[in-house]
Each structure stands twice: as C-alpha cells, then as structure tokens.
Image (spheres, rainbow, N blue to C red):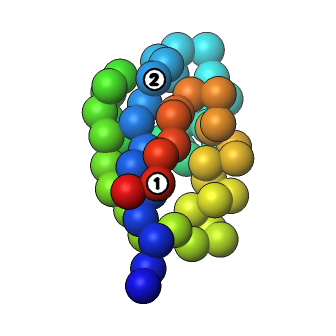
Amino acid sequence: MNKKLIITQVRGLSGMTQRQIESVKTLGLKRIRHSVTLNDTPALRGKIKTVGHLVSVKEA
C-alpha cells in the first residue's frame, strides 16, 4: 500500500526565496489553506523539508 500525505499550505509566500516558492508550486499548492493529497516518496519528503515552515503535513 502506498502511504498518502495531506499537505496544506498554512503561510503565504511573501518574502520567501525563489527555491521555496518553486517547491510550494511543485507540490501543487496555490493559496493559504489549500490542501493536496500526494503519495509519500523520498522526493516529496525533500520538498516538504524545504518548506516545512509553510505547510502542515498529515498522513491520510
């Protein structure tokens, strides 16, 4: 079974580095309180680590 993660953007992107902005957009998040459900992969965990202070993560 593939584990799924629910990722929710909780902070805005104002003042963030370009790398952090691109990571949030790659995750598919568009605005504050927007959530997406994605498969748990090592690449996804790396993106979450980059923007961990901007998102909240729960297991689905």
Q: Which residue is mark 1?
A: 59
Please, is residue 18 above or below residue 43 in the view?
Answer: above
Q: Is 24 placed left or right of 19 in the picture?
A: left
Please, is residue 20 above or below residue 27 in the view?
Answer: above
Between residues 27 and 2, which one lies in front from this camera angle? Answer: 2
Please give the name of the residue rendered at 51% of the width and 43% of the height, measured from the top-left corner. Answer: 57
- Which quarter of the image is occupied by the C terminus? bottom left
- The number of callouts visible is 2
Please, is residue 48 above or below residue 2 in the view?
Answer: above
Q: Position of residue 19 (x, y in %)?
A: 65, 41
Please give the name of the residue rendered at 47% of the width and 46% of the height, measured from the top-left corner. Answer: 58
Asked if disc 1 and disc 2 are in contact, CB closer than 8 Å, the reply is no
Q: Position of residue 2 (x, y in %)?
A: 44, 79
Please give the name of the residue rendered at 61% of the width and 48% of the height, measured from the top-left corner. Answer: 48
Tag on residue 10?
Answer: 2
Q: How far is disc 1 from disc 2 in space, using C-alphas?
A: 16 Å
Please, is residue 18 above or below residue 15 in the view?
Answer: below
Q: How many neighbours does mark 1 have within 10 angstroms: few (below 14), some (14-19), or many (20 or more)?
A: few
Q: Is 12 placed left or right of 53 in the picture?
A: left
